[in-house]
Image (cartoon, grey):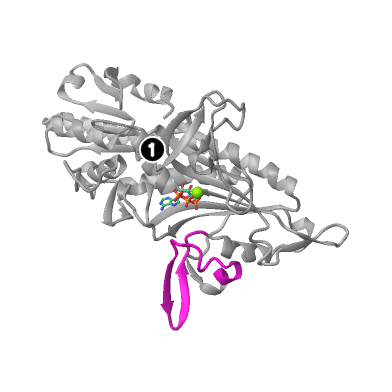
Amino acid sequence: MKQSGLLTKTRKEVSQQEASVNAQLLERAGYVNKLMAGVYSYLPLGLRVLHKIEHIVREEMNSLGAQEILMPALQPRDSWDVTGRWNTVDVLYTLKAHERDLCLGPTHEEIVTPLVGGYIASYKDLPRAVYQIQTKFRNEARPKSGLLRGREFRMKDLYSFHAQEKDLDEYYEKVTATYLRIFERCGLGALTYLTYASGGIFSKYSHEFQTITPFGEDTIFICEPCKLAINQEILQDQPTCPGCKTDQLVEQKAIEVGNIFKLMYRFSHPFSLTYSDDQNVSRDIPMGCYGLGTSRLMGAIVEVLHDERGIMWPREVAPFNVHLLSLSKKPEISAQAHELYVRLQHAGIEVLYDDRECSAGEKFADADLIGIPLRLVFSDKTVAQDSVEVKMRGAQDANLVSIETLMEFLCQQGL
Ligand code: ATP
Ligand code: MG
């Protein structure tokens, strides 16, 4: 894409009310635009990142054998009365239309349980797992951290249905490993911990995936060798590692990027979900649910991966693979830069091509702010050496690579 035609422009400053790093950088670089507290538009660059994150999540969910569906955000009160949660979920957005009580879905247990239940009759119909990636609505009290806490936000929610508790246990372990892989692919692997947290009323623990960042709202105690943590919210006394039992734990601020639960029968009972086993005996269906905030993940990546100049996207979620900067004022050299842009695109490389008429300084500053992992500079100086200057975002130095071997070089970089 040519940057001269891009909808957005970078900004030097955004409102000082935006205290969080992700809100500051994402707005300044033109990824998102705030409509009101906790509600954002995703702009061309931002939507590309969100789609890339959701593509990773989708691939990993499909690898678990889960099937993608899409459930309504608009829901009737009747479904919520079955579980009694109409009056207990404090973040529920409710509305009345034609004398009917409705809500905007903050989560989907009330919808998915009877929906999937309608297709389960016997043990032959189990296990089943469905997921969706969807916009959720929660009337959060203090949405102040950019994409980390939205009132309208994106979530992947997966629900699993099993014949026996041991099948749920096995599936839960698989989902845990899959979640860790998702955070790894999103560049947060080293800073994301499987964390023991409150299981609410259905099980002793739930598991959260907590990413360390100073802006996080949770406090966790980490056992580095076990790569496990425990959430402060469930502590009664001195924290110990759930793995090796040591009390030598490190306290950190963290943000919950995912949360998985063994729901057991919390939802299948009120919706009377049962199946017939091979003896034709009616049995209850234990369930699991597994949430992951894809927009929060985008904010968390920025919280963790940035420097004083801007964002440093990991490769798999960057809006483009390469940022090509054309610095020459000479038409024949600009034409060569354009040729290179076309050639890169033909090779299947996603390029943001800075062809704007502005200073080199501005182009460099914007490239650092936008944060695409690989920067190519095409200028009078590099052309004199039949080369392109190559620099990784975050690296100190740039190198010249000859135009002839550039494709090979990019190939070696995994592009
Ligand atoms: P928190 O404790 O941070 O309020 P939660 O425990 O209420 O979150 P869950 O119901 O477990 O959240 O939702 C599943 C996932 O959805 C969370 O792990 C998080 O990644 C994401 N999420 C939850 N609330 C928000 C929000 N307000 N904005 C963005 N993402 C959210
Ligand atoms: Mg949670």
User: Which residue is at a point 42% across and 33% down the rendered structure image?
Assistant: 252
Q: Measured from the top left, where is residue 323 in percent x and y?
A: 28, 33
Q: Relative to 138, does residue 364 appear above or below in the rendering?
A: above
Residue most extreme to the bottom? 99
User: Which residue is at a point 26% across and 32% down the rendered structure image?
Assistant: 324
Question: What residue would you read off at disc 1?
Answer: 301
Q: Which residues are magenta?
A: 79-107
Disc 1 crowd rating (10 Å Cα; few below 14, some 14-19, many 20+) is many
**Residue type, numbered disc 1:** Ile
Tell me the quarter of the picture where residue 384 sits: top left
Pick the residue in front: 409 or 332: 409
Instruction: Give left or right: position of 212 versus 8.
Output: right
Does 312 lie within the magenta span? no
Pick the residue in front: 396 or 357: 396
* Residue 137 in view, yes or no: yes
Q: Measured from the top left, where is residue 135 in percent x and y?
A: 43, 58
Q: Relative to 163, does residue 239 appear above or below in the rendering?
A: above
Q: Measured from the top left, where is residue 407 in percent x and y?
A: 37, 25
- Secondary structure under tag 1 reads helix
